[in-house]
Amino acid sequence: MARITPQGPNSSVKTPALKDEPVRNTVVTRSPATNTPAAPLAPAASTFQAATPSPVDAKLAQLRGLMHGITDRGEEKQILDMFRSATPGELNQLLTRMPRNELHELMGDMDNHLFGPKNHDAFLGVLSKERLGDLNTDSRAKVIDALQYHRTDSKAEEAVRDIFLGTQGSALTALKNAVDAGGDYHDLQQLVFHDIDNAGIRSQLLDHFAKQAQSTGQVKVLSDIDDTFYVNLKDHRYPSKTVYPGVRAFYLELDKGAGASPDREGDLTFLSARPYDRAGIGEGMTRSMLDENGVKTATVLSGDFLHLIGNSSIADKKFDNWQQYKQLFPEYKSVFIGDSGQGDAIFGAKAVATAPSDMKAVFIHNVTNMSAEDRKAMAQKGVFVFDTYVGAATEAFRRGLITREGLERVASSASVELDTVHFDSREQYAARKSELDRDLAEMRSVLGARS
């Protein structure tokens, strides 16, 4: 969801007026230069017209003034009246122009008085019930984001539930995607399965998601990180930390889909074995790494310490994460990209066997020199093993997951990016170039047969 930095009221700048000369709200214009003698200078004042703050600017300034210091009951009532009386356009602008921490602070400033009005409950009720019908998707996501910020108490959980339950059909899909794409660890899985402690509310949300699901015909692109996105554990074929040639283009083409017009982008999620922590520190580091390597928007689902040892254990945790993700987004199918070094093939085979209609394809990056027999055994389980991302994209094209043009774009990216890798030796480069040339030849054969 968009993070928009608030802007205060426009300030005006005035030049000093000459003595006894009235200030006029006009802008002095200049006429073209001529060759006629200059007339004697007459006293004049150059002024800028003062910009009038917009209604939203004025309301934001007033709101911040009321929030300054301790907010008393009278100020709380003014805030409630402001949000209740704002036009739909003003209300949405107020919410989207307030940073998450400021909106969260405002919610905290509204108190439930022991002997007096329950202004905190009333304010949450305005946003989650009274004015919910006037809030657009971004504003609903912004309110949920502020409620999720720091600790989510029982009242916040109820307000989150009311916003989701008050949103249906394709609008609900858009809202879930907006919450999931918040840009940090406060994603939809974090909210539903970690921040919300009330099992009854969680059940209500998941039931609502299931009942309102309308098939999008699209896929969520799920990927491992280490040795799938970049070299980090067992792959010695490339220099450490190398982003694999063509992987980012492959993600993008799977996200776009194979339709005549590209699908909505932003459906990339990483299933990581890296342990989850409540504060999101580990996920923040992962996000920073992805951002530095060209992946600006993605969701990250982490593992845990209990499932960190052993390929089967890692696979079990990724399967659990995927099961949760399916409950959050039942209107989508999935594809998964992993590697042969850390339980991904086990997870992929289990997912295909358990829900073949939901897991449309599993691609496993060969980083452990799998034998032809092992590859064939994986293929029989619905798992495709590949050496280069051109090979993966060719198989995706065969399965109708990406377009012909998309396959060609992956091939172009992989070819260009391979030549930017600083290999440790000429032999290492020659081996990777040979693999790519082989898969490019296969790609051309497949495209030629489809012409």
Image (spheres, helix red, strand yellow):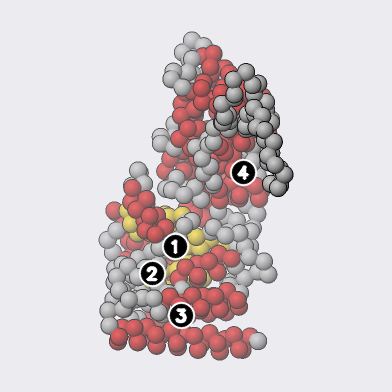
Residue bearing mark 3: 415
Q: CA distance from mark 4 to mark 1?
A: 27 Å
Residue bearing mark 4: 137
Does label 4 or label 1 sit earlier along the sequence? Answer: 4
Going by the numbered disc 1, the residue's amino acid type is Gly
Q: Nearer the viewer, mark 4 or mark 1?
A: 1
Residue bearing mark 2: 243
Q: CA distance from mark 2 to mark 4?
A: 35 Å
Q: CA distance from mark 4 to mark 3?
A: 40 Å
* Mark 3 crowd level (few <14, some 14–19, many ≥20, 10 Å Cα): some
Going by the numbered disc 2, the residue's amino acid type is Val
Contact flag, marks 4 and 3 (Cβ < 8 Å): no
Q: Residue furthest top?
A: 115
Secondary element under disc 3, as helix, strand or loop, is helix
Residue bearing mark 1: 294
* Residue 141 on image: x %, y %: 56, 42
Relative to 11, 320 lies left or right: left
* Residue 336 on image: x %, y %: 47, 66
Frontmost residue, 36 versus 79: 36
Contact flag, marks 3 and 2 (Cβ < 8 Å): no
* Mark 1 crowd level (few <14, some 14–19, many ≥20, 10 Å Cα): few
Secondary element under disc 4, as helix, strand or loop, is helix
